[in-house]
Amino acid sequence: MPAPTPPPPATLPDDVVRSDDAGGRIVLVVLDGLGGLPHPETGRTELESAHTPNLDALAAASSLGMLVPVAPGITPGSGPGHLSLFGYDPVRYAIGRGALSALGVGFELEPGDLAVRLNLATLDDQGRVTDRRAGRPSDAVAREAVDRLRERLTPPSGIQLFVQPEKEHRAVLILRPQGPDAPELDDRIQDTDPQSTGVPPHPPEALAPEAQATSRILGAVLGQAREILAGGDPISGVLARGFAVYDGFPSLEGRFGLRGVVVARYPMYRGVARLVGMEVAGVPTSDEGAVGMLERVFGRYDFHFLHYKDPDARGEDGDFAAKVQAIEAADQWMARITRLEPEVLIVTGDHSTPAAMGTHSWHPVPVLLHSRWARPTGDTFGESACRLGDMGQMEARHLMTLALAHAGRLDKYGA
């Protein structure tokens, strides 16, 4: 049966009344994959194991709590996790990763475009996946493979094709309907990524009758891509997922009166920020460079989003000690952000990535919110302290409402 029609987007959440006054500046620091699980020998999570004097000092003057990115027991992807932090219900405002990747590399999507996240992968001579990420190739090696696809892919009738490199093994494919007889594209397609090795990619099967034509188009395009890349080392195929038909999105400014800016090294996170209307400060080449970029743009915007990837990457590697080190590295530059003195400073993650699991998980994520109106309850930043904090445990989508309130950007509700 066809998917239910979503409700029309609201200008503001029903329980929010925006103030006419400008209010204070907000900084959101996302330590990707921050939440973890206790180490069996110490009983402490990665965050609790890390030496974080700057975060601990901040926590001692902040409200603490735990965030549920989507709903209890639901493991979020990075897109839903971030949309929730930006104040969007991630179930109501769903978007596939392909659109985030396309926006992240600066591609200007048009309504009706189908964006597809590609993994450049290694396949054996039997067509079985031997490495889903092709050994995490350098950007230069990946760009060479993408260039071959650009040169040799033949678009199906009524379709314009674009292929863009993203970072390392990541790329994005965009299909754009073109001409009076162009098909209407549908994103209800099964991922071709089997999420394991030793098996061939799945076919891009339609998950709804309306997606049959799109399935055939994708099958032809992905078949061509496999032939073009066959025999390459290390990149000899592609895996497709995150299908998304783009149809626009309500902006932070329209919903909350916030002019936003993003500072992120990885394209996907610039993409999710662009999706809600944030401007891109630039493309930092290091984490220290990202902090410097935030310092340079601070004060020109109402909402500043800084993304840091390493805790998530080390958690997915299953490396507890390396994730601890990544958190400690972030703590070293947190003092610079604190010195900016935003009216509201939030530090949290988009989801948990426990090293013990080696993947995203459903576990709630620690959060601190620093402002002059905070109610401090602890003197360390970690899961145990945050569970006892005055913010309690709440859905992450409500964090934006709290940020607006602490920034003096909300009026009283009701008489």
Image (spheres, grey):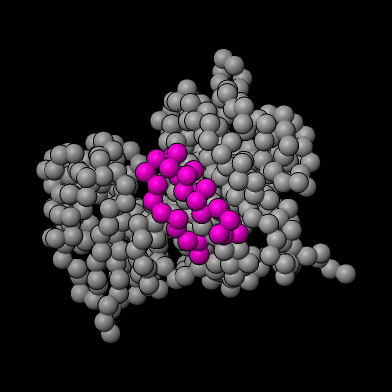
Name the image quarter holding the C terminus. Answer: bottom right
Of the pair 385 and 140, the residue shown nearer to us:
140
301 inside magenta stretch: yes
Please identify the quarter of the rendering in which residue 225 is found. Answer: bottom left
Measured as percent of width and height from the top left, residue 248 is found at: 47, 70
Measured as percent of width and height from the top left, residue 306 is found at: 51, 47
Measured as percent of width and height from the top left, residue 44 is found at: 61, 22
**Residue 277 visible to an observer of this rendering:** yes
Of the pair 306 and 169, the residue shown nearer to us:
306
Please identify the quarter of the rendering in which residue 93 is found. Answer: bottom right
As drawn, 155 above or below 235: below
**Residue 76 visible to an observer of this rendering:** no
33 sits to left or right of 265: right
Measured as percent of width and height from the top left, residue 299 is found at: 58, 56
Of the pair 385 and 72, the residue shown nearer to us:
385
Q: How many marks overall?
A: 0
Q: Residue at x 31, y 56 (%)?
A: 172
Q: Residue at x 17, y 49 (%)?
A: 144
User: In the rendered structure, which segment of residues is drawn in magenta?
Assistant: 277-302
237 sits to left or right of 38: left
As drawn, 322 above or below 11: above
As drawn, 39 above or below 114: above
Q: Residue at x 69, y 43 (%)?
A: 370
239 inside magenta stretch: no
Of the pair 364 and 304, the residue shown nearer to us:
304
Q: Residue furthest bottom?
A: 180
355 sits to left or right of 301: left
40 sits to left or right of 271: right
